[in-house]
Amino acid sequence: MKYFIKRDLNEYGPYALADLQRYVAQGNISPNDLTRSEGMTDWVPVSQVVGNIPPPAPPQAVPVAAPAQGGMVYTGAPTAAAAAYGTAAAPTMAAPAAPVVAGPVPSDLHWALVLLFGVLSCGMFSLVWVFIEGGFVKKIRPASNHLALIITGIVIQFVSIIVFYASIFGLAFASAGNGSNQPPAAALALVVGLYWAGLFGGLALRIVGYFKIRSAMLDYYNTVEPISLRLSGVMTFFFALLYFQYHFSRIAAWKRTGYLEPQVYQG
């Protein structure tokens, strides 16, 4: 049976009964905090649930790389009630999680700066940053083919643009040579059709590449470095570059401090 913990307006969990007892013994959860099981509707003090159960034996310590500064990683996922209140600040109650693992550290550039630099550079910075994010994910999941898909998509789009304008100029010169101001309608329609096919085809490949990045991140950060990472498919589809960078910044901060800022999932 799983249990939820309530403090103020926030809910956390679910936790197994053994985990609940351990967190109380470690002082992360107060016996006076409120709890309910998945089948309960009323909240009761934690002490009524775990008071007479002896705490489980602590797990065997495994040597890992220590964080740069002492701290605890918060990975308890806010439940629907917490999401409804838009809670983003770190709660005073936190479930212990695995210490920082000695793995690659992503870039810590704030997502708002990525957006700003992308706008100021007319998209060129964003294009470069895609490869920075993709290169990092390649480090944690070398077998992923996300970079190949993204590169192919970008190349197709650029080639489509170049071919389109070259074809338009070619048709215009050919028409002028024949004494006409209007290029052949069939040829023009073909050029336009190929142009849009290339743009949307390249975009489709890039989106598939972004979802490959999402899958690689979910796999790695829920197995090798388990931080209960969750990534929205909708956010990945529309805002992949900025959305990934937001989480990369969270992970980089965790690597530095040992504290992982809780996320509010909106999948």
Image (spheres, rainbow, N blue to C red):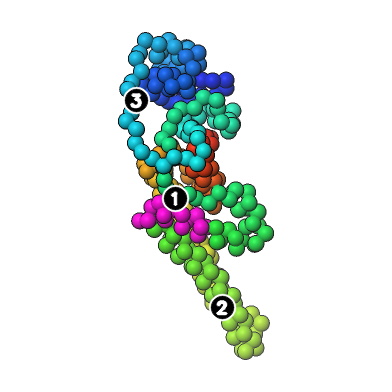
Front tag of 1 and 3: 3
x and y percentages locating residue 100 in the rendered image? 44, 40
Q: Which residues are magenta?
A: 130-143
Q: Which residue is mark 2?
A: 167
x and y percentages locating residue 167 in the rendered image? 56, 78
Tags 1 and 3 touching, CB below 8 Å? no
Badge 1: residue crowd in 10 Å (few <14, some 14–19, many ≥20) = few
Residue drawn at (46%, 17%), measured in percent from left and top? 35
Q: Give the amino acid at mark 3.
A: Pro
Q: Give the amino acid at mark 1.
A: Pro
Say which quadrant the N terminus sits in: top left
Q: Earlier in the sequence, mark 2 or mark 3?
A: 3
Residue in front for this viewpoint, 11 or 267: 11
Check residue 104 in the rendering and tell me which mark sits there, or answer none.
1
Name the element at disc 1: loop
Residue in front for this viewpoint, 248 or 144: 248
**Looking at the image, is 14 positioned above or below residue 190?**
above
Residue in front for this viewpoint, 79 or 219: 219
Would residue 46 be found to the left or right of residue 86 on screen?
Answer: left
